[in-house]
């Protein structure tokens, strides 16, 4: 999945998911917290099943903390007729989402970011030497 889209969370906590991303995500998808960043992550049903299998294949002692966080803080979503999903308050609080957000395609998943956090992160990343190092590692 690719692209970034600026959207607003409405007063009822609903967020419009762009049609291009909805096509790839399917009719049902899963929104959860990110374990690496203060954002939310959306998985298609197929990607969610792969993630679940990864957790299931780890020894319980290794995976239990992350599993508790991920599975207890996940909501199964089906967009309404206007392409909106309801983001629970707890998830919005975790990611610091108020009104203005960025919905970004990130390969096999989608991320939802507070717009200010996204802009700051993107600007910092654009000026970082990390991109050059990554390009070398990928041989591009």
Image (cartoon, rainbow, N blue to C red):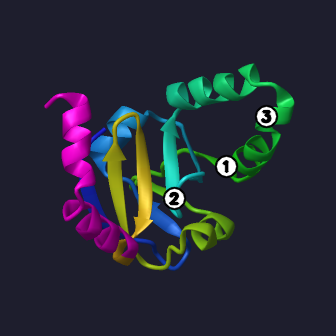
Query: Neighbour class for label 2 at 10 Å: few (<14), some, many (≥20)?
Result: few
Task: Name the mark on residue 37.
Answer: 2
45 is higher (above) or lower (below) than 66: above
Q: Quadrant of the N terminus?
A: top left
Query: Neighbour class for label 1 at 10 Å: few (<14), some, many (≥20)?
Result: some
Viewer-closest of 69 and 26: 69
Q: Please name the residue shown 86% across and 34% down the image.
A: 61
The residue stretch that appears in magenta: 117-140
Q: CA distance from mark 2 to mark 1?
A: 16 Å
Q: Residue furthest left?
A: 140
State the residue position of label 3.
Answer: 62
Q: Is mark 2 in CB contact (under 8 Å) with mark 1?
A: no
State the residue position of label 1.
Answer: 74
58 is higher (above) or lower (below) than 27: above
Q: Secondary structure at mark 2?
A: loop
- Look at discs 3 and 2 and give the one toward the viewer: 3
Q: Is mark 1 in CB contact (under 8 Å) with mark 3?
A: no
Magenta segment main secondary structure = helix
Q: Position of residue 59 (x, y in %)?
A: 81, 25
Q: Position of residue 39 (x, y in %)?
A: 50, 61
Q: Is 128 inside the magenta-drawn segment?
A: yes
Left or right of 3: which side holds 42?
A: right
Q: Secondary structure at mark 1?
A: strand
54 is higher (above) or lower (below) than 91: above
Point out the tag, 2 or 1, that comes first from the N-terminus: 2
Q: Position of residue 87 (x, y in %)?
A: 57, 62
Q: Please name the residue shown 47% across and 35% down the image.
A: 27
- Look at discs 1 and 3 and give the one toward the viewer: 3
Viewer-closest of 66 and 14: 66
Q: Please name the residue shown 39% across and 55% down the image.
A: 82
Q: Quadrant of the C terminus?
A: top left
């Amino acid at each position: 999945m690719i692209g970034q889209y600026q959207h607003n969370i409405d007063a009822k906590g609903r967020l419009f998911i762009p049609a291009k991303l909805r096509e790839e995500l399917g009719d049902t998808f899963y929104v959860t917290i990110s374990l690496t960043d203060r954002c939310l992550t959306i998985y298609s049903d197929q990607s969610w099943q792969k993630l679940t299998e990864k957790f299931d294949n780890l020894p319980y002692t290794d995976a239990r903390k992350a599993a508790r966080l991920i599975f207890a803080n996940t909501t199964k979503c089906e967009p309404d007729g206007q392409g909106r999903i309801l983001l629970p308050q707890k998830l919005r609080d975790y990611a610091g989402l108020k009104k203005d957000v960025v919905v970004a395609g990130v390969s096999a998943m989608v991320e939802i970011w507070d717009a200010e956090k996204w802009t700051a992160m993107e600007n910092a990343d654009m000026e970082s030497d990390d991109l050059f190092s990554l390009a070398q590692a990928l041989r591009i």
